Image (tube, rainbow, N blue to C red):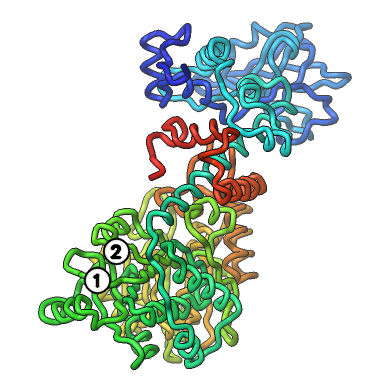
Amino acid sequence: MLNESVINVKGIGDKLYESLVEMGISTIYDLLFYLPFRYDNYETKPLSELANGEKVTIEGKVIGEPSLTFYGRKKSRLVVNCQVEHTIVKGVMFNRAFAKKQMQDGDVVTLTGKWDQHRLQITISNYKKGNAKTQDPIQPIYPLKGTVTNRQLKKVIAQAIQQYGDQVEEILPDTYLQAYKLPLRAEALKQMHYPTNFQTLKHAKRRFIYEEFLLFQLKMQLLRKRNREATKGNTQNYDKNKVEYFISTLPFQLTNAQKQSLSEILRDMQSPNRMNRLLQGDVGSGKTAVAAISLFASVTAGKQGALMVPTEILAEQHYSSLLELFDEVAQVVLLTGSIKGKKRKEVLEKIKKREADIIIGTHALIQDEVVFPNLGTVIVDEQHRFGVKQRKTLRDKGINPDVLFMTATPIPRTLAITTFGDMDVSIINEMPKGRKEVKTYWAKESMLDRVLDFIEKEVNQGHQAYVICPLIEESDKLDIQNAVDLYHQLQATYEPTIKVGLMHGRLHADEKEAVMQQFAKNEVQVLVSTTVVEVGVNVPNATVMVIYDAERFGLSQLHQLRGRVGRGSSQSYCILLADPKGDVGKERMRIMTETTNGFELSEQDLQLRGPGDFFGSKQSGLPEFKVADVVHDYRALETARSDAQKIISQGILEIDPLYAKLYQLLESEVVFHGETLD
C-alpha cells in the first residue's frame, strides 16, 4: 500500500501531484518519510532563561501605540513596546508597516525573533495575535521546491498519516528497541512530523539516526561479504622467509604502525577472498615502503604486482626508487602514456610473457593492449578512490586481483567508516624516526617582502620553493591573489638569477608534466601553482611552501600542500600568508602552526567545516542522511557499525525472521533508490 502513488492521499490534486513528484515524492512512502530539516521553536520561556543572540518566542501585552517610521523607498521600521512579566521589552520589525493596525494597545501578542539580552529587545521574524498556547510550540520546516508551501506539505502529510500511518511497519528487532530504548517506527514517524514536545522529538530523532546508520552499515557489510564470496580462489601463498629477508635488507627500519599495516595486508593476500583495503597514512609516513613489500610478496607467490599512480612524473619517481630497492630480486617495468613505439611494445611483451614482475604506471595499465597473465596485487596510489569503471575493466579481463588503495589524506575515523564502509582500513599514524617536522608560520600580507627575501635566501642555498594561490586568473568576485599575476610579479622580483615556473589546472597534461619535470630537475627554482600540486609530487630539494590567502583552504588541504616539502634531509618551512577576518579562519591558522599530525588536523577540520566540505562537494562520496549527521552523531555511527558487523558475521540477516522486515527494506528500492547490492 505504501508503494502506491501519492495521488491516492486525499487533498492531492493533479497540480500538487506534479509538484510533489518534482520534489522526489511519488509514493505514499516517500511522502510519509519526507522529514523536516529543522523545527521552529515557539515554546515560551521566562526572560531570565533567554540566551543572547538566540531565536526565542515571548508572550506579552502591547503598551501604547506602536511607532512606525519610513526610510528609503518602501522601507519601514515598526517598534512595539510589550510588557513581558514585569519588564518592558522592545519589539522591532522591518518592512511590515501593515502590522501596526494588528497590534493595538492592550492586545496580547506572541513574538518570535532574535533576542538581544543587553537592550531587552527582540528583532521580530514572526508575530501572532493572542497567546502562545493557541499554536503548536514546535513547528516542522520542510525542504521545499517550486510552488509547494510548508503549510500545504504539513496538511497532506497529516492526511497521509491519518490514512496510512497504521501501515508503517516496524523493521528493527525488539532486542535493539529495548537495548537502546527506541520508540516504535510508526510512533517515531508521527513525532518527527508533529512533535508533542522536545523530549519526544529527541527520542524520535534518536530512533531514525540509529536506523539510517544501521541500514547504511548493513548495506556496506553485505556488499563486502558478497564481493568476497564472489571472488574466492585468490589465495597468494607468498614465501614468508624471502619477504622477511627482503625487509631486513631495507636501508631503514619499519615503524610499528608500518608493521601492523603490513601484517593486515599480507593476511588478506593469503586469504582465499579478494583484498579490498584502504591504507591511510600521513605524508611521509612510509606507505610506499609497505606497498613495495606487498608487491614483493606477490612476486614470491609466483604472481605479478602493479602500482598505479595518478601522474607520469610520480610513476617515474616510483619506478626509479623501486628499481633500486628491488635490484636483482624482481624485474620492474614502467608503463605510461608517453612511452610509445618500439619501447612500448617491448614493455607490453614483457608483461604478457611474465618477464616483468612489477609494473608501475598510470591508468595506462588497465588499457586493452595490456595483458596480465597472472596479476596478483594492484596498488592504487591516488587522492580519490579507484573508480568502479577501472575495477570493472580488470574484472572484464578475467582478473580479480587483491586491491590496495593508498591515500595521503588522513581521513577522520568517523568519515572513514562511513565513506569506506565496504573496505577494510589500515592506518599508519606514526612517522619514521629522524624525520624533521616542517616548521609552520603564519604571516600577514604586510610581511610579504620578508617572505620573498626568505625564499631568495633558501634558493641561494641550493633549495627550491612552491608558492600556492587559490585562483588561476583575476576574479572580480574575490579579492585574492591569482596564479598568473603572482607568476609575473615573482618573475619581475627574481629573474634572471632565479627561474620562476607556473602550473595550474588549465594547462594541458603535457605542459603540466613539462613544468614539473623542470622543477624536479631544479631547472625551475620557484614554482607558482594552484592546488594541482597537491597530488603526490616528490621533490626532496624543495624546502619552502608559501600559501597565499591560506584562510581560504581547509586544514586538510593546507596539510596536504605542506606535505610537498620536508621530503629531504634539510629543514623545511611552510609559510601561511593570511589575513582572516573571522574566528574560524584565525583558528585554522593557529591549529596549522601548532600541529603537524594529519589525523589530529583532519578531526579538527571536520569540526570546523563539516563532512560535506571535507573532500570537496563533488567527490565526497558521502551518503546523504535525512536525520543523521556523521560528525555530531558519531557515537551512534560506531554503535550501528558494530551491530551491523555482528549481524552479517553471524549470517542471520537473510534467515532470521526477526530481521525479515529489515532485510526486505534493505533490498528494496525504497531505501536505496534502485541501487542493488549485487
The amino acid beneath tag 2 is Ile
Q: Residue at x 53, y 39 (%)?
A: 655
Residue flagged by tag 1: what amino acid is it?
Phe
- Residue 133 locus on image (x, y percent): 75, 12
The secondary structure type at the circle numbered 1 is loop
Q: Is residue 671 above or below residue 362?
A: above
Q: Position of residue 517 (x, y in %)?
A: 29, 80
Number of numbered discs: 2
For marks 2 and 1 on the same chain, the one whose residue lies earlier in the sequence: 1
Quarter occupied by residue 305:
bottom left
Pick the residue in front: 121 or 141.
141
Answer with left or right where residue 148 lies relative to residue 581.
left
Q: Residue 479 in the image: x percent, y percent?
A: 44, 54
The structure residue drawn at horizontal position 33% and vertical position 62%, both measured from the top left corner, is: 400
Instruction: Decide: few, some or many residues near mark 1? Use Cα within 10 Å; few <14, some 14-19, many ≥20.
Output: many
The residue at which mark 1 appears reads as 372
Q: Closer to the camera, 22 or 659?
A: 659
Res 73 visible: yes
Q: Residue at x 41, y 43 (%)?
A: 677
Quadrant housing residue 173? top right
Q: Are marks 2 and 1 in contact (CB under 8 Å)?
A: yes
| x and y, in percent, of residue 473 in the image | 33, 58
Q: Which residue is mark 2?
A: 399
Would you identify the image quadrant in which residue 110 lies?
Answer: top right
Closer-to-camera residue (574/563) = 563
